[in-house]
Amino acid sequence: MAENAGWSLVNVESALDRWIDVDDPDDDLRNTVLNWLLSRIEDPYQGVRRDPRFANLWFGRIPWTLRGDRQAVCAYRIEERSREVICDSIAMLRLPI
């Protein structure tokens, strides 16, 4: 769990591990995704939108991750009360998203 600026990141390591096992991204893509995830500590709402079908589920494309016809995306929950950003999944999805 990473912590700073009042928000904590939860479940990031296991989400990253699952994504790496499935998509086998290169080091540059891994670093870009990790840096974006760490930016959630400062503002978890930046560049994402809430999925109205689920409580507290947020989804966004990760900038600078377009590879051919696929782009990295992330889904996570924002728990206001505990100030936690709980990473549910990271994936490479085909366009259009």
Image (cartoon, grey):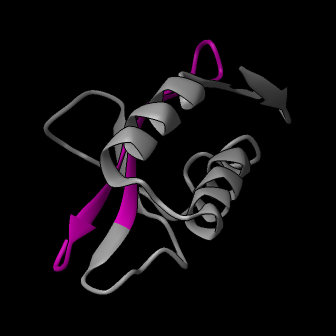
30 to the left or right of 3: left
11 to the left or right of 31: left
Within the magenta stretch, is there residue 80?
A: yes
Pinpoint residue 86: horizontal percent, then vertical percent: 50, 25
14 to the left or right of 6: left
Q: Is residue 78 visible?
A: yes
Q: Nearer the viewer, residue 92 or 6?
A: 92
Total marks in image: 0
Which residue is drawn at the image coordinates 36% and 30% (left, top)?
Answer: 56
Pinpoint residue 15: horizontal percent, then vertical percent: 45, 32
Question: Which residue sits furthest right?
Answer: 4
Which residue is drawn at the image coordinates 53% and 74% (left, top)?
Answer: 63
Q: Is residue 85 visible?
A: no
Q: Nearer the viewer, residue 39 or 19?
A: 19
User: Which residues make up the magenta segment?
Assistant: 72-97
Question: Which residue sits furthest top?
Answer: 82
Quick check: 44 above or below 81?
below
Q: Nearer the viewer, residue 40 or 91?
A: 91
Question: Which residue sits furthest bottom?
Answer: 68
Pinpoint residue 37: horizontal percent, then vertical percent: 62, 48
The quarter of the image holding the C terminus is bottom left
Pinpoint residue 83: horizontal percent, then vertical percent: 65, 22
Within the magenta stretch, is there residue 48?
A: no
What secondary structure is the magenta-colored segment mainly?
Answer: strand
Quick check: 10 above or below 24?
above
The quarter of the image holding the N terminus is top right
Which residue is drawn at the image coordinates 39% and 81% (left, top)?
Answer: 67
